[in-house]
Amino acid sequence: MPLTKDKLRPTVIGPTGASLRSPAASSPPLGPAPEPARRVPAASPVTRQPTAIPGAQRKRIEVTMRDLQALSPGAAAGVYKEALALLGEFVVDKVSQRKAILWGHDVQKSYGDRVTEMLALARSPVLIRVEGHLARMMDILGSIDLMAVCGHGGSSVVGRLFQGINRRIDTPGELARAQAELEQLLALMGAALDPLLDLKDRLLRLAGSMERAAEQIEASALGALFLSGRLPQDDAELAQRFAERSMSLTQTLAQMQQAGSTRDLQIEHPVRLISAIQNVALVMMPAFIGSIASIAALGGRNTSVSPTEASELAYRLRDMIDKLKP
């Protein structure tokens, strides 16, 4: 049956989740009526602030550059700066016998380790080998009598000039054998050049770190001396411990200064060997070997090499020997 106009009703859409039934049509709630909800007050905003914990302020000892200069006049600027840094970290309330006894101990131990390393490097096998090669090379060169090999020995003026040279190598055959060994030594010494350079660099770096350690030890000694006179009167034992540490550190510093010349010699040793290889073995020796090879190849006593040529070659030989000497 078609709908008539008077039967049409508008559709009412309420809020989401609300019942479409009117309040009158709703069923009455079962049980007692619920109590009205209590209104919860809105939470007030929380302001966060740093937490302050009451406590005593750390007590430190005041020290100036002038105070340290009065105790140790003439020290390096780096020593005063290092001592000020050490004393700036010193807290009186946390000091103890243990801390006083160990004041500066680490740097003392570090210096001892460096001394041990320096001694080990000074006894490096490469140094021993190259020294042996140099000694053997000088022995061979000193045994060559070039005037005799060239047939110009005897009582000549030039011959008498070189009488101090060992006369064991005085024939072309002996000279040829000497030449072969000199070539072997030359090759060995050339191969040792790079290890020697590495050793020299390690020694120089180690020497630099030892100079730094010396500055730290002097600063620690100065700081200990300052503390020994600035601690409160009731800390007499602690003051004594710091005085003892200052004396111990000063003694270590004196030993380092005395060992300075020895350390310089240890560094100079590989430098001297490097110089001998570069300036003599690798520069002068090849030409000299070529000259004696020509003489040895002639065989027998001959007069193809004039006395002047032989004497000039002998002078070159003596010059090489002098340059190879330590």
Image: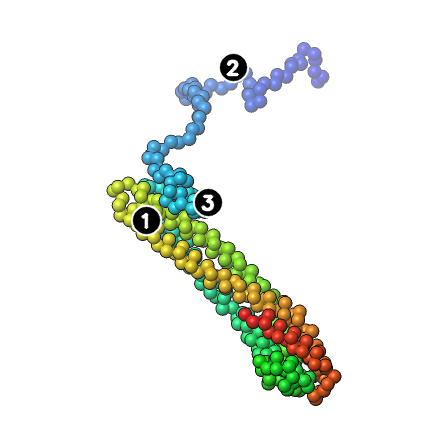
Residue in the foreground of this view, choosing between 65 and 167: 167
Q: Residue at x 52, y 15 (%)?
A: 23
Tag in front: 2 or 1: 1
The quadrant of the image that shows the C terminus is bottom right
**Residue bearing the label numbered 3:** 77
Residue in the foreground of this view, choosing between 168 and 234: 168
Image position of 7 with respect to 296: above or below: above
The residue type indicated by label 3 comes to: Ala
Is 47 on the left or on the right of 240, as rendered? right
Q: Is residue 107 visible?
A: yes
The residue lying furthest to the right in this view is: 304
Q: CA distance from mark 2 to mark 1?
A: 98 Å
Tag in front: 3 or 1: 3
Q: CA distance from mark 3 to mark 1?
A: 23 Å
Q: Is residue 180 visible?
A: no
**Residue bearing the label numbered 1:** 242
Q: Residue at x 56, y 66 (%)?
A: 272
Q: Position of residue 13 (x, y in %)?
A: 61, 18
Question: Quadrant of residue 226 in the image?
Answer: top left
Q: Position of residue 172 (x, y in %)?
A: 67, 86
Q: Residue at x 34, y 32 (%)?
A: 54
Mark 2 residue crowding within 10 angstroms, few (<14) / some (14–19) / many (20+): few
The residue type indicated by label 1 comes to: Phe
Question: Quadrant of residue 34 in the image?
Answer: top left
The residue type indicated by label 2 comes to: Ala
Q: CA distance from mark 2 to mark 3?
A: 100 Å
Question: Quadrant of residue 152 in the image?
Answer: bottom right
Callout 3: SS: helix
Callout 1: SS: helix
Among the two numbered marks 2 and 3 on one chain, the one whose residue lies closer to the N terminus: 2
Tag in front: 2 or 3: 3
